Amino acid sequence: MIRVLGIETSCDETAASVVALDGDSTPRILSDIVLSQIEEHAAFGGVVPEIAARAHVEALDGIIEAALADSGVDLADIDAIAATAGPGLVGGLIVGLMTAKAIAAAANKPLIAINHLEGHALTARLTDGLDFPYLLLLVSGGHTQIVAVRGVGDYQRWATTIDDALGEAFDKTAKMLGLPYPGGPNVEKAAADGDATRFAFPRPMKGSAQPDFSFSGLKTAVRQAATAIAPLSDQDVADICASFQAAVADALDDRVSRALNRFRQEFPGEVEPALVVAGGVAANRTIKATLEALCEKAGFAFVAPPLKLCTDNAAMIAWAGIERLRAGISGENTADFVPRSRWPLDSISAPMVGSGRRGAKA
Ligand code: KG4
Ligand code: ZN
């Protein structure tokens, strides 16, 4: 039996969780506590790093205590502490990793420094018991990536965004249109009453051979359309949101279908290939339906873990710790590990020219 305490503080969620694995049985999430800071940041229309770090300091001890209490496991019976060590906002990472180091030192437990993206990448094995290899589409406020997940610690980034992350594009669109933060759910809500054909927004990168993403041109097109017809009525806002969402779905369809083709070529022996989605944008029903239809056409299983485990949480960090312990590659688990605000999953992939991981989230 392996039991790991996970800690996540890389952006604006303070989270702790205990996950257990008994032999080869199904893993169990014994506790999973996530405290969102959305209210603290809403007035600013985005995550404010200093406010986030302070909120983590205030909340983390209590969240860890609650996660241990909920799990019914004593700290003495925990096998390791796994904490997000990057990428993300460095203030929050310091709070989480230092707390984890202190607990590990005091309780004499190993510490495992986890890459937040690895947490997202391995979640489908926690929730759906998926076997390697599979394809991951991560669409959140800070990242838009397609990753071939080949094994624990064995990831290849096949695509990333050359400018904004998709969630960021939703948030900025919402802000331009006067919709509240976080923008994604509000754009989706407004789009429900809109005409998706009213504005012919660009489908960024459509047709390019590399499955990379770009959303800043789309954002500019939205701004121009909104400025041209200002002041906006509710119907105008709804039509812009619906047209924006249709452009995004269409662009994703093209980009992801190229990655599915590449997966077929690189893993010809995979009889049941799968596409996994993670990140807050995966909550969008239009996007989900588009990806589901694409997978069906291409003969891929479509795996969307429950939203609570798709967005930032600590169960995925605890699980990544278990995967690393089990694979014998708990790796960089020294007390000297320093938080990394940037930490690509795939060290071979060169950074994109002009790419901004501008958003805080991963
Ligand atoms: O995964 P997440 O909760 O946090 C990280 O970024 O790690 O993702 C948050 C992002 C925000 O940009 C939010 O606007 C977007 O996901 N989002 C959505 C929807 N729900 C959340 N975007 C589009 N449609 C939604 N329904
Ligand atoms: Zn994340």
Image (cartoon, grey):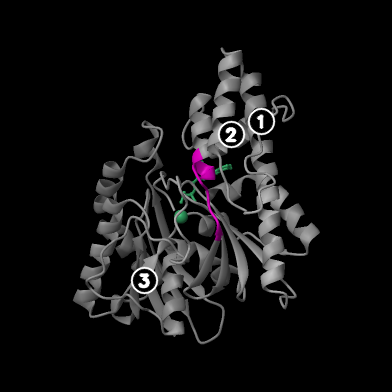
- For image coordinates 70% across by 52% down, the residue present is 291
Three-letter code, disc 2? Leu
Mark-to-mark CA distance, 3 and 1: 46 Å
- Crowd tier of the residue under label 2, counting other residues whose Cα lies within 10 Å: few below 14, some 14–19, many 20 or above: some
Q: Is residue 330 left or right of residue 270?
A: left
Three-letter code, disc 1? Phe
- For image coordinates 66% across by 30% down, the residue present is 201
Q: Contact (CB < 8 A) between labels 2 and 1?
A: yes
The residue wearing badge 1 is 201
Q: Give coordinates of residue 186: x percent, y percent.
A: 56, 34
The residue wearing badge 3 is 5
Mark-to-mark CA distance, 3 and 2: 41 Å
- In depth, the one of 230 and 254 nearer the eye is 254
- Crowd tier of the residue under label 3, counting other residues whose Cα lies within 10 Å: few below 14, some 14–19, many 20 or above: many
* 198 vs 32: above or below: above
Q: Give coordinates of residue 78: x percent, y percent.
A: 34, 78
**Residue closest to the far right:** 297
Q: Considering the numbered disc 3 on the image, is that residue within a helix, a strand or a loop?
A: strand
- In depth, the one of 295 and 34 nearer the eye is 295
